[in-house]
């Protein structure tokens, strides 16, 4: 066991006494120094005796009333650095997450006929769900032998868990992992050698799932024919030395058909006349193959398809496996660990891509489904901070608006387990923060389970998010939005207009005219007439009602989410979509600050467009893009009220700091990559000069591994991965095609880039390999061309004929 505790700071145990109520019986290894009655009531929620078992979550060091004293720094700095972002407020104690298990056992020999006990683990890790198995065993142990020794054994067992070999992922690597369904993503990051197979079938790389498109019978047929032809091709492996030179290998064997073409690693079959070439890495044992090195490359993480399987050692070399049949890959989204408790080895799956604002195993799907029922009713007055689409605003959008604008929110679950209510609070925090990736500050004001004991304290926190089971809170009136998870209804406080007066920095009527000219081709019709009205005739609520009559981006987004859930897309896909929604809201706010408030934004890139003549060279655009001016004007108008309200919250200030820090530390400097990718995806009639400048800028700025991961994090599979860049392979200008090949060649240098290239469809991959083959041949010819003196060149017959033709 390490000399300093790393995973568990405290273990608590509480009992319910029929005469004295909830009592905190044990605190190990020492007292926390906070109100014991408060801890006991949080561990034994209301109605616990009606549930055989329940889980609750609460936090310590969150506010002055629940801060522990003295604050113990039991966690390891190294572990904290891996799994938590840097705490900006140095004088503020670190947040402790408390996972609590309460159990009721019927016993006729005691008064009231039941024994109620609760045990809790206090940990600095936000992924508290991994401790549920050991906590279950520890509470069973305590029921059998109630003593403080049970707490000590649990404390020691949790802190003996070894995760020192868990890979450390950067922000962009986490973003890639979250949206990838591949079980071997970043497998090279693991310290110890792990089973690795390069037998990646076409069906695997294109299979539909949580974040990918639908099945393709065309690709399935390719797979079937590929299996028939397997073994006919020559294996091509990457050099273990890391040179990784591209190679051209003529093969006299029967060439596989186009159906067997695949990018299983870095080698791809390409047919050319009577010979078959393999474009990829030169093999150390390829015999008489001809290899030409264009520039040094790192070894890729996969080799070509073959009938044998391989393992990868720590140096990155591929070695044959002793076992002919490759074992099933472990899921690299999790780090496997074990907790040894009472001679039991409990397997633990440590998530590697979580962010601090994500606590526990929450479910956005459950949150959306609960408040998207036909029976969902929204009662109370409309408010522009909440109703961005008027009376057509979806309940989930109302909840998001309430979260980002700092409203007081209560989740009520009458006769529901406290653990279920807690999950809704944690899901709401993830909803508002973009799953912890975009915004932060929500967990700090969240109370997954709250009760009457500490009501005054948590109700005094501005913009609190609380989960309760007592219906008395509904009549208290100390909330702005109440979400009843039992009846799927939302209640908006009747005093919300008094508490939060609706006001925007610019009158709505003026906003519609100031953000751009609404032209007839925008199909806005009567909206133009509304735009030229005097601003006094159109208040904020009327503006929201008017905007809601059109195809609102929020409503379209929610329709897509509900459709994805109905089609059984998974939690990972839904989380990724809400992350994008939160990020887009922030980019709209940055545009709002520039266009409407006429200020230099500090939360996003400045709003500029591509300029062909900007000084000595053209300039790329930046900032959020819209399909047309009318769409942009409508979106800014719809978001005006909630943006103004968000700008007055602590969340806005935290994001200002985070954005400036991220901008300074970003591997790709001086370019808004998201803007360029949006242009490649959606713009129509792009100037060739802009396309070339985008590709050239990307090629110049994608030279390191960190730059590659930043680019790939903006190309998730559910947005077709590398497809926006692959359009350059089919451009009419050769320079753009060459730049695209150069970018893809750089991606090939890294295992994660190879995996993204594998996700290209059959035609994109074939175009890439063919053009890369031609480009390599062209560069080879240029390298082999003899340098001839200019005077001799001018006397050659060919040059004389060319000169005469030019003169003629």
Image (tube, rainbow, N blue to C red):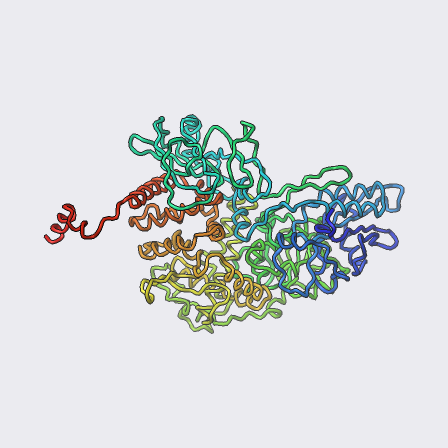
- Foreground of the two, 244 or 17: 244
Residue at image coords 54%, 31%: 321
> For residue 500, what is the image quadrant?
bottom right
Left or right of 419 on screen, residue 142? right
Q: Residue furthest left?
A: 808
> For residue 270, what is the image quadrant?
top left
Percent x, y of residue 722: 42, 46
Q: Is residue 428 visible?
A: no
Vertical comparison of 596 with 548: above or below: below
Percent x, y of residue 221: 42, 30
Left or right of 230 on screen, residue 480? right
Vertical comparison of 341 with 370: above or below: above
Q: Is residue 229 visible?
A: yes
- Foreground of the two, 44 or 808: 808
Residue at image coords 78%, 48%: 119
Vertical comparison of 79 with 181: above or below: below
Percent x, y of residue 299: 47, 42
């Amino acid at each position: 066991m390490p000399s300093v505790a790393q995973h568990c700071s405290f273990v608590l145990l509480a009992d319910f006494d029929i005469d004295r109520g909830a009592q905190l019986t044990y605190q190990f290894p020492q007292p926390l120094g906070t109100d014991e009655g408060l801890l006991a009531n949080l561990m034994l929620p209301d109605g616990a005796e009606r549930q055989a078992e329940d889980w609750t979550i609460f936090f310590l060091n969150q506010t002055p009333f629940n801060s522990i004293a003295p604050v113990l720094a039991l966690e390891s700095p190294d572990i904290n650095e891996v799994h938590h972002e840097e705490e900006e407020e140095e004088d503020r104690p670190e947040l402790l997450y408390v996972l609590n298990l309460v159990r009721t056992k019927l016993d006729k020999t005691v008064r009231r006929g039941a024994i109620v006990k609760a045990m809790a683990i206090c940990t600095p890790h936000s992924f508290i769900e991994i401790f549920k198995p050991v906590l279950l065993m520890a509470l069973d142990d305590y029921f059998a032998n109630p003593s403080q020794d049970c707490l000590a054994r649990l404390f020691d067992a949790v802190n003996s868990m070894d995760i020192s070999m868990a890979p450390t992922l950067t922000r962009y690597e986490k973003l890639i992992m979250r949206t990838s369904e591949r079980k071997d993503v970043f497998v090279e990051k693991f310290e110890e050698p792990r089973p690795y197979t390069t037998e990646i079938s076409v069906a695997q790389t294109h299979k539909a799932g949580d974040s990918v498109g639908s099945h393709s019978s065309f690709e399935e047929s390719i797979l079937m024919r590929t299996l028939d032809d397997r073994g006919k091709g020559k294996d091509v492996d990457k050099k273990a030395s890391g040179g990784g030179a591209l190679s051209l290998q003529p093969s006299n064997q029967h060439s596989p058909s186009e159906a067997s073409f695949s990018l299983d690693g870095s080698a791809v079959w390409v047919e050319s006349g009577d010979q078959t070439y393999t474009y990829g890495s030169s093999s150390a044992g390829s015999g008489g193959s001809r290899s030409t090195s264009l520039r040094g490359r790192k070894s890729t993480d996969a080799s070509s398809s073959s009938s044998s399987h391989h393992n990868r050692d720590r140096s990155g070399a591929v070695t044959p496996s002793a076992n002919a049949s490759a074992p099933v890959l472990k899921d690299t989204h999790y780090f496997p660990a074990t907790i040894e408790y009472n001679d039991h080895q409990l397997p633990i799956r440590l998530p590697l891509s979580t962010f601090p604002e994500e606590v526990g195993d929450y479910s956005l799907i459950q949150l959306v489904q609960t408040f998207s029922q036909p029976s969902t009713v929204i009662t109370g007055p409309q408010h522009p901070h909440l109703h961005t689409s008027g009376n057509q605003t979806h309940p989930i959008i109302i909840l998001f608006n309430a979260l980002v604008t700092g409203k007081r929110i209560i989740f009520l679950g009458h006769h529901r387990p406290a653990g279920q209510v807690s999950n809704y609070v944690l899901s709401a925090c993830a909803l508002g923060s973009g799953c912890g990736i975009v915004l932060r500050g929500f967990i700090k004001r969240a109370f997954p389970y709250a009760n009457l004991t500490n009501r005054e304290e948590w109700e005094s926190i501005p913009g609190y998010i609380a989960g309760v089971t007592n219906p008395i809170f509904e009549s208290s009136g100390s909330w702005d939005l109440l979400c009843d998870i039992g009846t799927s209804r939302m209640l908006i406080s009747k005093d919300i207009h008094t508490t939060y007066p609706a006001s925007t920095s610019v009158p709505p009527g003026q906003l519609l005219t100031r953000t751009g000219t609404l032209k007839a081709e925008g199909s806005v019709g009567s909206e133009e007439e509304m735009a030229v009205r005097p601003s006094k005739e159109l208040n904020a609520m009327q503006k929201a009602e008017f905007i809601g009559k059109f195809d609102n981006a929020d409503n379209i987004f929610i329709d897509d989410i509900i459709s994805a859930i109905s089609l059984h897309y998974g939690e990972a896909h839904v989380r990724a979509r809400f992350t994008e929604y939160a990020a887009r809201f922030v980019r709209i706010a940055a545009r709002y600050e520039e266009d409407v408030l006429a200020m230099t934004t500090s939360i996003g890139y400045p709003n500029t467009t591509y300029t062909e003549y900007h000084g000595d060279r053209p300039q790329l655009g930046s900032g959020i893009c819209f399909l047309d001016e009318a769409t942009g004007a409508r979106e800014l108008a719809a978001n005006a009220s909630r943006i103004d309200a968000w700008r007055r919250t602590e969340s806005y200030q935290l994001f200002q700091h985070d954005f400036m820090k991220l901008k300074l530390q970003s591997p790709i400097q001086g370019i808004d990559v998201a803007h360029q990718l949006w242009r490649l995806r959606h713009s129509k009639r792009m100037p060739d000069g802009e396309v070339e400048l985008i590709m050239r800028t990307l090629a110049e700025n994608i030279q390191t591994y960190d730059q590659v991961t930043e680019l790939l994090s903006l190309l998730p599979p559910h947005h077709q991965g590398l497809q926006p860049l692959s359009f350059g392979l089919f451009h009419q200008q050769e320079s753009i095609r060459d730049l695209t090949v150069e970018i893809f060649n750089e991606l090939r240098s890294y295992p994660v880039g190879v995996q993204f290239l594998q996700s290209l469809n059959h035609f994109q991959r074939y175009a890439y390999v063919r053009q890369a083959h031609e480009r390599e041949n062209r560069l080879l010819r240029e390298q082999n061309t003899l340098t001839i003196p200019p005077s001799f060149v001018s006397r050659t017959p060919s040059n004389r004929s060319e000169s005469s033709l030019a003169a003629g």
